[in-house]
Amino acid sequence: MDILSLLVFAPLLAIFFILILPHNQSNFYKNITLVSTSIQFLLSLIVINRFDFSYPKIQLVEKFDWITINMQSLGYLSIDYYLGVDGLNLALVVLSTFIFMIGVVASWNVKENAKAYFCLYLLLTASVIGCFLALDLFLFFLFFEFMLLPMYFLIGMWGGPRREYAAIKFFLYTLAGSIFILIAMIGLSISAIEPLETAEQMNLTGETSADLIANVQNQLQLQKIPKKALVHTLDILQLSDKSNYIKGTWLSWDNETVLWGLSARAIVFLLLLIGFLVKVPSFPVHTWLPDAHVEASTPISVILASLLLKTGSYGLLRVAYTILPDQAIEFGWLVATLGVISIIYAAYNALAMNDLKKMIAYSSISHMGFVVLGIAAATAESISGAVFQMVSHGIISAALFLLVGVVYDRTHNRNIDSYRGLASKMPIYTTLTVITFFASLGLPGFSGFIGEVLILLGAFAAHSHNGIISSWFAVGATFGILLSAAYYLWTLQRMFFGKFWVKNGSLWSKKLTDLTFQERIILFPLVFLMILFGLFPHLILNIVSPTCALLADFIINR
Amino acid sequence: MVALISLSILGVFSMIAGLFNVNTKAVLTISIVTILGVLGFTAGFHWNNDYSRFYDMLNFDNYAVAFTCAILGSTAILLLFSEHFFSNIKQYITEYYSLIIFSVVGMIAMVAFDNLAMLFLGIEIMSVPLYILVGSQKKNLLSNESSLKYFLMGAFTTGILLMGITLIYGETGSFDLSTIQSYFQENATDSSPILLVGLFFLLAAMAFKVSAAPFHFWTPDVYQGSPTFITAFMSTVVKIAGFGAFFRLFYICFAPISEVWTTAIWVMAALTITIGSITAVFQNDIKRLLAYSSISHAGYMLISLLMVKNVESEAFGAIFYYVISYSISSIALFSVIMAVQKVKDSSSIDAFKGLAKANPLLGIIAAVSIASLAGLPPTAGFLAKFYILKSTVESGYVWLALIAVTNAIIGIFYYFKVLIAIYFKEAEDQSLSLIASSLAYKIVAVLLVIGILVLGIFPDLVYSIF
Amino acid sequence: METNLPVDYLPILIQFFVAAGFVVTTMVLTHLVGPKRDSKNKLESFECGIESVGNARNPFSIKYFLTAILFVLFDVEVIFMYPWAVNFRELGIFGFVEMLIFMTFLLVGFFYVIKRKALDWE
């Protein structure tokens, strides 16, 4: 078992320990979880250490045959256990191990049914990290869908009053999305081959494996390979290679069959797009997110906003854009339109919210809209910006939801109009909130700024670079930044400044104390990172940009 | 063959044992051990060792052996859970065991037949004990009602089945599957109307046995009225046998004229899945809900009949994997239902409120088995659906795949109604914490859960045996 | 003229209609034309000239039913004896053993019935 597998499956060991520990030792559950997530964080640092920053392709590969389906006269379907890191996922993996560690500390006070809580939490860590690392579409899908189940229980069992509704809504929306991905996956599974394994079936040998691959691909184009020897694959990297597609199948590049006015490749792209946009979430399939956030407890909100949403945008890049670059150009306008609508529509919604958590949920949708826009533009800067924005939003939204949790824990009320002038009562809390709000609205010097600027630059330049989208999309998105400044500043003004007043008078003012030690140790590092990445963006960009430039090139030169 | 003989003797033995008041635990143990022994023998001796008997009326090829083993294995596991069922019934306990065993004998004949007469015999030997078992709660009105309903409808179907066999015999002059098949091959283009009528009579009769729409109306009433143990038996073991026979008959024997019946199967599968899952949404009784869910699953299994153009081993693998994964998930879920009914005399979903808190083990078993039935990864149910959908798309039935997928989402909704009750609701009284399960129960249930997960992660264990 | 058309069967159809028509006409006619003089005695059901007593649809003991079913069950098995008897020589020792097994199973069933007191009247 190599380091990446260890990273994914270490939590299972911790689950085992938690399960065998008797009930009267329930205090240790959180300790075990903390240790497990810390180990994961350390492992992810080791991965960074081993990572070669100058090499833009997949590294630290772990690949084994997993499932082989023998279809006799139709050949084989080979599904691999395939993990690896490159610029797209490394930063996200480190982000997730870090946020999961923060999340454990934030759930330090979970008493009710702690055993189940921490087991589910650990299952979630395994599946989210597995999802980021998987490079076989089947394995990716497995992790992608499996993370719904622990999340469903975490929202539904430890959530607010309408938790059942929120949990099932979350589940049905995202599951419907994954079903679209499943259909796309089935279509892909019968269209492309894995050249090396096919060569093995044909008993071909070559000097080098590159020769062998070229030989097989050549024969495939000439349709010389007997059907019985074809080894179909779901390996994302093989699926992205044009010459691996079997001539005459629906998804081959030269197929011109038209269904409902669209080519089969376009349909598959749209299926994947819908599936991933539900998870991002983007307009018009975003309505599950505010409900889920409002009902979920603070640590779960943190995980949901900063990690689960990222699996959607990551999937868009890794699966849809890598496998179907031709369609990515074709439908760039659609993706960008949805992104811009999300930015502006969600920002307006945030402006109207009185519930602080709902406001932040909508601001999340708005900021993920930037990621979608960046992906749509598909230039080197905009994709790097999108990945940077994912990481930065992961940090900022985690901090935002933790900050909401602070007042909610004290008063069990999150309405903006229930508080005024909190600055005088809770100075440290106010300072952190101000910094986080500014980071989120994109003030220069904070990480949010870098991501958004890169995305906007890329989107402006896309017009002249690859011509996917016009510059007007960037103009529209800029308007979104303005709106986010509006709702953040307005909220600051209403809640934190002015004369101290709270709705329930003396009862609440006694409860509203400043940050506890436990809250400080999770908020300070987050705020520190926002500033660090804002001032030294190359820390992330060094990892991200080579791969992103490669992907942008790949899309243009499809 | 050995399976048939030794199980018949076992059946007679446990019937006689009832006369002399032999300890029921002993009879149960002997039955389970014998069944497992027969399973081991069948798997070990007959695998890759085709074995024909009675002038080729029975043929134990790999297909038959695999299904026989599935039937025997499921029966053995179910018998281990039978404690509760028999604690309610004071009299004639071993006789009920013998009825179950006789029914299993019929099923083995059903999956190994090579002759239409044997198919008829198998179906009858399976069904007659079932009529009695369904009505085994003599004092319960619902049980009586369902027994009568099942008997009348079943008798009627038998007539249709016989009529179909007769018509086919009239045209082809044989009961023998291979003769019929070669007749079809020679006359594939101009099959006479009589033959087609016979074929569709057989189709209707088999569809009734596996409760596929539009022949499914008996299922909810019978499943709800029967004792839970028998419901579990019917929705798993009987279903395996039904599909074993259905598949053997249509996929192997009627394959040459598949153009004639694939459209019918297409429509039936779409109807079955849709009716099953949409009606299940409105159920409040868990047994009724599972009845509709089993109808919906029957639809998925029907789809595998459409793969005639594919290769045998893939279609065999797909149906067998589906049958196995469906059966172990259902058995696991039914074991939870039986445990709950031990303390609560109700099968409404409300009875399950707060189960996870009162008994976490049962909660986990229910969660995993429901996830598998709903088709979520990484359980066996997900891969079962994946294989079926994959081959549906491969064979060109894209619309059917879309219908199936849509219903899979609806499926989540009603399965999760049960999960919500188990996990998110507070218990109304303390009775659920009284559930005391024996160590054997725990071990078997946990093994089932592990089985569901292992099959989901390493499907090749079952999928590629053919 | 070896054609075999449906129209060739027309005479049969006509014959059928004539026959059915005659029956229907005479029945309807007698019903309409004939005189009716009903009385109590005339309308009473006739049973061997003895005066009828009570309702025919009386519940009777379920034991009759059980006995009847068991009779049918054990009677029908004689059907299997006839083909065996006819082919006795051809089937030889194999047939004899098979029949023996069959009879054993039947006897076990009979034994069970007796032991369970299905034939006891009280």
Image (cartoon, rainbow, N blue to C red):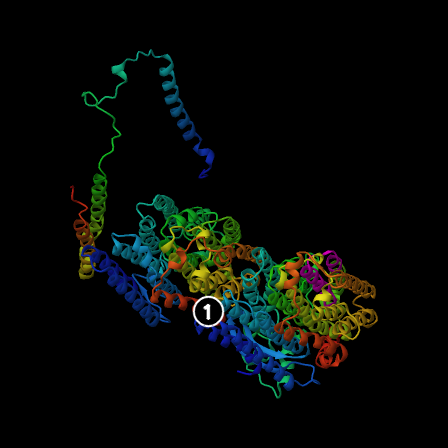
Residue A442 point in image, percent of width and height? 77, 70
**Is B250 in front, or is B129?**
B129
Please tell me whether residue B328 is drawn above or below residue C114 in the rendered image.
below
Q: Quadrant of the N terminus of chain B?
A: bottom left
Determine if the magenta segment contains residue B449. Answer: no
Given residues B38 and B341, the one toward you in this image is: B341
Q: Quadrant of the C terminus of chain B?
A: bottom left
Q: Is residue B85 left or right of residue A199?
A: left
Q: Is residue A367 magenta?
A: yes
Q: Give above or below for B456 relative to B202.
A: below
Q: For residue A414, what is the image quadrant? A: bottom right
Q: Amino acid at mark 1?
A: Leu
Q: Judge by depth and name the residue closer to the eye, A324 or C63.
A: C63
Q: Which residue is mark 1?
A: B455
Residue range in magenta is A346-371
Percent position (x, y) of residue A120? Answer: 53, 68
What is the x, y in percent for residue B66? 39, 66
Q: Main secondary structure of the magenta part?
A: helix
Residue A386 in view of the camera: yes
Q: Secondary structure at mark 1?
A: helix
Q: Is residue B47 left or right of residue A529?
A: left
The answer to whether residue A50 is above or below residue B298 is below
